[in-house]
Image (tube, grey):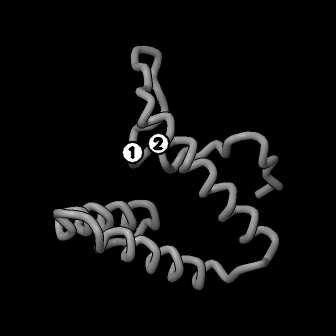
């Protein structure tokens, strides 16, 4: 992985495979989706920067992100259904077999 120019969004092909945020020729993104896409790019850039710099162990970062996600989900309705979706997404993104 090369260094990321923070002034440009990260090209994240994995995000598009799970959540179709990238527009096709026939679709137009709504404002909410554009904001989510920008946030995803910012998070990716932050993670990439710290992992490439060796500032953080990727395993510890995964634990930290899990903790933060759990804290966020604590305040949501339908936690069980969302948890199922999150587990499925994690398995697919990490290429973990069930």
Q: Is residue 69 left or right of residue 13?
A: left
Seen from the viewer's position, the closer of residues 60 and 90 is: 60
Q: Is residue 65 above or below residue 88?
A: below
**Residue under the image location 83 percent in, 55 percent down:** 3
Q: Is residue 4 above or below residue 77?
A: above
Residue 43 x %, y %: 60, 57
Tell me the quadrant of the picture where the C terminus can be found: bottom left
**Residue under the image location 41 percent in, 71 percent down:** 69
Q: Residue 19: name its quadrant.
A: top left
Q: Residue 87: name its quadrant.
A: bottom left
Residue 12 x %, y %: 58, 46
Tell me the quadrant of the picture where the N terminus can be found: bottom right
**Residue under the image location 47 percent in, 44 percent down:** 36
According to the image, label 1 marks what residue? 19
Residue 71 x %, y %: 38, 76
Contact flag, marks 2 and 1 (Cβ < 8 Å): yes
What is the tally of numbered marks visible in this picture?
Answer: 2
Q: Residues within 10 Å of mark 1 (few under 14, many from 20)?
A: few
Seen from the viewer's position, the closer of residues 45 and 91 is: 45
Secondary structure beneath label 1: loop
Furthest residue toward front: 75
Residue 42 is marked as none
Q: Residues within 10 Å of mark 2 (few under 14, many from 20)?
A: few
According to the image, label 2 marks what residue? 16
Q: Residue 75: name its quadrant.
A: bottom left
Secondary structure beneath label 2: helix
Q: Is residue 35 left or right of residue 79?
A: right
Residue 31 x %, y %: 45, 30
Mark pair 2, 1: CA separation: 5 Å
Q: Is residue 37 left or right of residue 5?
A: left
């Amino acid at each position: 992985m090369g260094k990321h120019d923070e002034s440009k969004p990260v090209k994240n092909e994995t995000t598009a495979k799970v959540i179709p945020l990238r527009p096709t020729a026939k679709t137009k993104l709504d404002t909410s989706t554009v904001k989510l896409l920008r946030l995803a790019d910012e998070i990716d850039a932050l993670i990439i920067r710290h992992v490439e710099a060796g500032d953080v162990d990727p395993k510890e970062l995964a634990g930290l992100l899990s903790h933060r996600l759990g804290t966020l989900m604590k305040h949501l309705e339908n936690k069980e259904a969302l948890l199922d979706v999150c587990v499925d997404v994690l398995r697919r993104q990490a290429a973990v077999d069930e």
